[in-house]
């Protein structure tokens, strides 16, 4: 079986589902370039828990975990099947790594999962297992989670971390736009790209001290933590390919990373 890469995707606003723009085009191109996975595991910034939880529903619901958006957004569904057996495999791998995991049979697919998957695999015919993020322990913990899941890539499973390369919703009213980009976006995006290209995992795990404007780019880091899941799942010395999907609202960098 072909070994799949791992991915980090910036899912942006829920409105990306209705207005996919450049992100939609880049994700469609990426899906066309990948071998078709037999299943997908997605670690989403919108499912936070104190310890790893694995969604084991056979038919996971589409969760509309947001408010104040157009009615058309709430009518969207992503009816992909679940994969209870794969969820058990994920839990077993995490347990083996000393990362005690629990199965959550009632967990659906939050918008960090279904928004990018609608753009990658619109037919919703590939089984999906959601995975929680632990905001407390920090990047090294999420990197270890990814490392534990690395064997799945040789089993036809696509491991995805879904977040946002920059994510500061406090700046929504600051007047940033396509014509006026937040000043911290490009320095932070460039630093991440350079450290990934250099294989400098130590600096990346310490990004809150070392990266320029880290506190502005991520007042809280739950949207960057899925990057470390994808990086850990990539194995030793991965090649990081940045896919530029633009910047939404002048502040949400929509970078996608493929790790081979």
Image: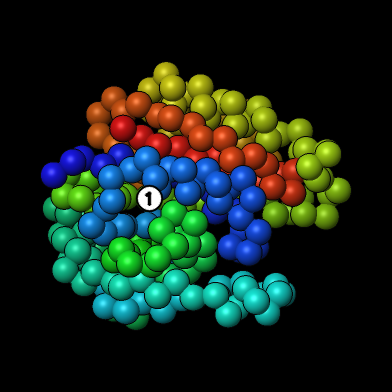
Left or right position of 116 against 137 = right
What residue sits right under mark 1 in the picture?
A: 160
Q: Quadrant of residue 61?
A: bottom left
Quarter of the C terminus within the rendering = top left
Give whichever of 208, 3 is nearer the camera.
Answer: 3
184 versus 100 height, above or below: above
82 versus 205 height, above or below: below
Q: Residue at x 47, y 49 (%)?
A: 28
Residue 252 at x, y percent in the picture: 66, 46
Quarter of the N terminus within the rendering = top left
Left or right position of 28 against 41 = right
Q: Residue at x 63, y 64 (%)?
A: 18
Q: Secondary structure at mark 1?
A: strand
Left or right position of 67 against 34 = right
**Badge 1: few (under 14), some or many (20 or more) residues near its Cα, within 10 Å?**
many
Give whichever of 80, 248 is nearer the camera.
Answer: 80
């Amino acid at each position: 079986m072909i070994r799949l890469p791992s991915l980090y995707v910036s899912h942006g606003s829920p409105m990306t589902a209705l207005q996919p723009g450049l992100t939609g085009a880049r994700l469609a191109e990426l899906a066309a370039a990948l071998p078709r996975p037999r299943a997908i595991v997605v670690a989403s910034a919108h499912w936070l828990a104190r310890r790893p939880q694995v969604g084991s529903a056979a038919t996971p619901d589409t969760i509309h975990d947001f408010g104040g958006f157009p009615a058309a957004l709430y009518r969207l569904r992503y009816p992909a099947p679940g994969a209870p057996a794969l969820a058990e495999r994920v839990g077993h791998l995490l347990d083996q790594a000393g990362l005690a995991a629990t199965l959550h049979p009632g967990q659906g697919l939050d918008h960090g999962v279904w928004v990018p998957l609608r753009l990658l695999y619109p037919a919703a015919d590939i089984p999906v297992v959601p995975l929680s993020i632990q905001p407390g322990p920090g990047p090294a913990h999420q990197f270890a989670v990814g490392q534990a899941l690395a064997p799945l890539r040789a089993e036809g499973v696509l491991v995805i971390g879904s977040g946002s390369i920059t994510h500061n919703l406090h700046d929504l009213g600051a007047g940033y736009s396509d014509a006026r980009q937040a000043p911290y976006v490009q320095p932070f995006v460039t630093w991440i790209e350079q450290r990934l290209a250099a294989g400098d995992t130590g600096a990346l795990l310490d990004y809150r001290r070392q990266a320029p404007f880290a506190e502005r780019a991520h007042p809280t880091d739950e949207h960057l933590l899925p990057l470390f899941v994808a990086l850990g799942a990539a194995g030793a010395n991965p090649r990081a390919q940045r896919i530029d999907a633009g910047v939404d609202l002048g502040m949400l960098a929509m970078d996608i990373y493929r790790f081979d």
